């Protein structure tokens, strides 16, 4: 066998769009070897798929998260959803949306001992990617709390929920008598984003709300939406929710941000909402 055949790129026909690969992590312009994908592209795909699967099944390292919060003098509560384990969680989404009986009672006891309701209940759940929570929850919370304190918002202890889904924040917020709730949760892993963190915000949280009552800020990670921008958008939603007494489909993200192109540093409106 010749040396040329042993080379990984031997026989690969490059795509004419190859220069576009520098602009996106999407799998485009992979070229071909005969009528098939090149071996390198196929191996990269299999590796990304394995990363996504691992992210779904990675255990929630809540102890490390609680230690990180304690170092910043932030209290936390560790609760569990009604899904007993990961196997049940993946097959019964409904159980991940509610607290277990023991956790609900513990939260009631906590709320009874703290008569003053809070503006925002903060929930962190593993969701479908504990990896996202491990990497991004602490730095995002640090940024959020800086902005919230500057505006005078009161925050709950950080409520950690094992095997939790988005709607579990409705029950947490209701039991804490919070005006609003936000849940930081690992999103379903993609083939190029196994660590994407999602934020779901709700005004007047209570059990039984549908997704139409929530606002989502997605893809919070170093390669996606920055912590500062995500916190900025969440603070905007909080202000507007208090002013209009609602959240969800009737509350649009019209945040304005300063850009480097603005010579006078004036904010630029969300271009998706301009006409």
Image (spheres, helix red, strand yellow):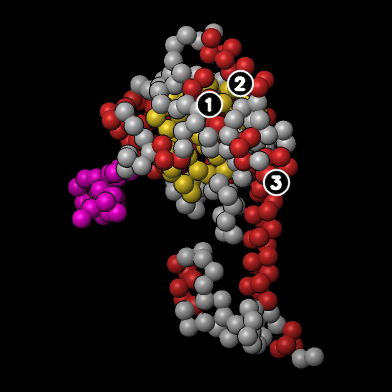
Q: Position of residue 56 (x, y in %)?
A: 66, 48
What secondary structure is found at the residue carrying circle 3? helix
Q: Magenta includes 261? A: yes
- Relative to 161, is 58 on the left or the right? right
The answer to the question of whether label 1 and label 2 lie on touching residues, with beta carbons closer than 8 A, is: yes
| Mark found first going from the N terminus, 1 or 2 | 2
Q: Determine which of the numbered discs, if any, sits on residue 104 in the image.
A: 2
Query: Which residue matches tag 1?
Result: 171
Q: Position of residue 141 (x, y in %)?
A: 49, 33
Magenta region's main secondary structure?
loop
CA separation, marks 3 and 2? 25 Å
| Mark found first going from the N terminus, 1 or 3 | 3
The answer to the question of whether label 1 and label 3 lie on touching residues, with beta carbons closer than 8 A, is: no
Q: Position of residue 109 (x, y in %)?
A: 59, 12
Q: How packed is label 1: few (under 14 Cα within 10 Å), some, or many (20 or more)?
A: many
The quadrant of the picture occupied by the C terminus is bottom left
Q: How packed is label 2: few (under 14 Cα within 10 Å), some, or many (20 or more)?
A: some
Give the vertical position of 233 relative to 180 (above or below).
below
Q: Determine which of the numbered discs, if any, sits on residue 57 in the image.
A: 3
Q: How packed is label 3: few (under 14 Cα within 10 Å), some, or many (20 or more)?
A: some
Closer-to-camera residue (246/20): 246
- Give the magenta-colored segment's residue range: 253-275
Tell me the quarter of the picture where residue 131 sits.
Answer: top right
């Amino acid at each position: 066998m010749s040396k040329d055949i042993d080379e990984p790129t031997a026989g690969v026909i490059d795509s004419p769009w190859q220069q576009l690969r520098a602009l996106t992590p999407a799998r485009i312009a992979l070229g071909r070897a005969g009528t098939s994908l090149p071996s390198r592209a196929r191996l990269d795909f299999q590796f990304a798929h394995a990363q996504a699967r691992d992210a779904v099944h990675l255990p929630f390292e809540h102890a490390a998260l609680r230690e990180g919060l304690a170092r910043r003098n932030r209290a936390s509560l560790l609760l569990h959803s009604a899904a007993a384990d990961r196997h049940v969680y993946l097959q019964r989404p409904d159980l991940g949306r509610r607290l277990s009986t023991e956790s609900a009672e513990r939260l009631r006891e906590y709320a009874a001992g703290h008569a003053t309701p809070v503006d925002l209940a903060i929930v962190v759940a593993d969701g479908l990617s504990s990896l996202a929570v491990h990497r991004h929850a602490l730095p995002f919370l640090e940024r959020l709390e800086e902005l919230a304190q500057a505006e005078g918002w009161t925050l709950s202890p950080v409520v950690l929920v094992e095997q939790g889904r988005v709607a579990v924040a409705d029950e947490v917020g209701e039991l804490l008598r919070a005006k609003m709730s936000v849940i930081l949760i690992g999103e379903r892993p993609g083939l190029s984003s196994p660590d994407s963190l999602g934020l779901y915000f709700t005004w007047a949280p209570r059990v039984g709300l549908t997704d139409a009552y929530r606002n989502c800020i997605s893809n919070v990670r170093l390669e996606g939406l920055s912590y500062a921008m995500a916190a900025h958008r969440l603070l905007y939603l909080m202000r507007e929710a208090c002013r209009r007494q609602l959240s969800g489909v009737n509350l649009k993200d019209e945040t304005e941000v300063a850009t480097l192109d603005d010579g006078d540093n004036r904010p630029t409106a969300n271009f998706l909402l301009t006409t």
